[in-house]
Amino acid sequence: LHYAAIMKQQLCSHLVGAGWVIGFTLSSYHLVLLSKLTFCGPNKIHHFFCDNSPLFKLSCSDASLLWKADSILISFVVLGSLCLILVSYMCIFHCILHMPAASGRKKAFATRSSHLTALAIVYGSCIVLYAQPSERVSLETNRTVALLNTV
């Protein structure tokens, strides 16, 4: 509710810059580890796109460090943003519950419920795909969940 008062041009620039720096840093670390893998077998990935899990399984070298690093980094990013969203939703629900009109509460809950459903699908599939060590997940399961996430 205080967006216009809080979000100034300088803060917006700092947030965008921080997002770019953090994203570039995390991606660079991942690419350095990925560049050290060797591939000696088939070069076909049976997936919709070049995702981490099928790529690691094609590698002839030990990808266990990459599996662990990916799980930790993705868990930090996905679960961190999920926690921020959940805290935000708790504040929103607190405000909704204190609305005087029942019709306003109903309309607000209806709007939020569709958004929460979309969040559950996106975050649920991201957690299944990326936050758990994917060595144990079959490529077929990975491909199905990736399709759900993509759609």
Image (cartoon, helix red, strand yellow):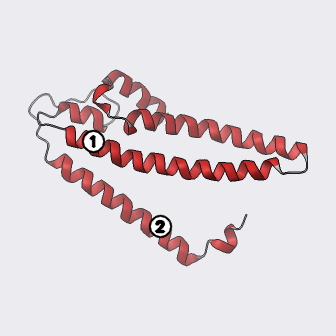
Taking the image as shown, residue 92 lies to the left or right of residue 14, namely right
Hey, which residue is sitting farthest left in the picture? 40
Question: Crowding near pointer 2: few (<14 within 10 Å), some, many (20+)?
Answer: few
Residue at the spot of label 2: 16
Q: Please provide percent x and percent y for residue 96.
A: 79, 49
**Residue type at mark 2?**
Val
Q: Please provide percent x and percent y for residue 121.
A: 54, 34
Question: Crowding near pointer 1: few (<14 within 10 Å), some, many (20+)?
Answer: some
**Residue type at mark 1?**
Lys
Q: Which quadrant of the figure contains the N terminus?
A: bottom right
Taking the image as shown, residue 123 lies to the left or right of residue 2, namely left
* Residue 5 quadrant: bottom right
Residue at the spot of label 1: 68
Say which label, 1 or 2, has the lower sequence index. 2
Q: Please provide percent x and percent y for residue 124.
A: 50, 34
Q: Secondary structure at mark 1?
A: helix
